[in-house]
Image: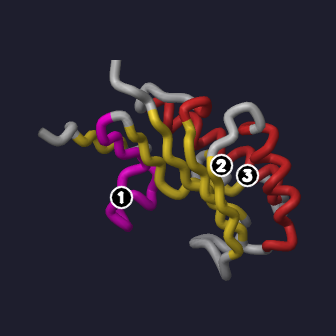
């Protein structure tokens, strides 16, 4: 029997337009959709890849909490960066949050994100054994 799948929306305006959930929980696995550095629909850290990365992971942290998980449960991160020349700023933010967790990761340069002000988008997978 396959585990139940729970879909947890965040209420972000893009979810119904595109047709996705912010979080999908499938057994002990928790998948968090691509998440950017926004607060109340506005991009934070104008032209600051570090600040946007920190905020994106804070948004991920809130999404994980809705599924009963935390950053400590993250096993994989993926970072999409519109200017790979800013990789060090993105890496510094990642290191500050994950140095003790050490998930597998990938950082990929992309041509653009859905909003031109967005410099970074992150996606994570977490593992939380069912109790």
Q: According to the image, label 2 marks what residue? A: 56
The quarter of the image holding the C terminus is top left
Q: According to the image, label 3 marks what residue? A: 53
Chain part drawn in magenta: 11-27
| Residue name at image x 86 percent, y 72 percent | 85
Residue that protrudes farthest toward the bottom in the picture: 111
Q: According to the image, label 1 marks what residue? A: 20
| Residue name at image x 17 percent, y 42 percent | 2
Q: Nearer the viewer, residue 53 or 77?
A: 77
Q: CA distance from mark 2 to mark 3?
A: 5 Å
Judge from the rendering whether residue 74 lies leftward or rightward of residue 85; answer left or right. Answer: left
Q: Are marks 2 and 3 in contact (CB under 8 Å)?
A: yes
Q: Position of residue 116 (x, y in %)?
A: 68, 74
Q: Position of residue 75 (x, y in %)?
A: 56, 42
| Residue name at image x 61 percent, y 58 percent | 78
Q: Nearer the viewer, residue 43 or 7?
A: 7
For label 1, the SS is loop
Q: CA distance from mark 1 to mark 2?
A: 18 Å
Q: Position of residue 28 (x, y in %)?
A: 36, 34
Q: Position of residue 59 (x, y in %)?
A: 60, 42
Where, by quadrant of the figure, is residue 122 drawn?
bottom right
Residue 45 is covered by the magenta coloring? no
Q: Nearer the viewer, residue 121 or 26?
A: 26
The quarter of the image holding the N terminus is top left
């Amino acid at each position: 029997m396959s585990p139940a799948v729970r879909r947890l929306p965040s209420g972000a305006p893009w979810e119904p337009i595109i047709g996705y959930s912010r979080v999908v929980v499938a057994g002990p696995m928790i998948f968090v959709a691509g998440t950017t550095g926004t607060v109340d629909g506005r991009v934070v850290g104008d032209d600051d890849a570090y600040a946007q990365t920190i905020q994106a992971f804070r948004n991920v942290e809130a999404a994980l909490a809705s599924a009963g998980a935390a950053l400590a449960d993250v096993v994989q991160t993926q970072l999409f960066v519109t200017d790979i020349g800013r990789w060090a700023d993105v890496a510094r933010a990642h290191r500050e949050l994950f140095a003790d967790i050490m998930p597998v990761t990938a950082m990929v340069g992309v041509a653009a994100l859905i909003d031109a002000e967005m410099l970074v988008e992150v996606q994570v997978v977490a593992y939380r054994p069912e109790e």
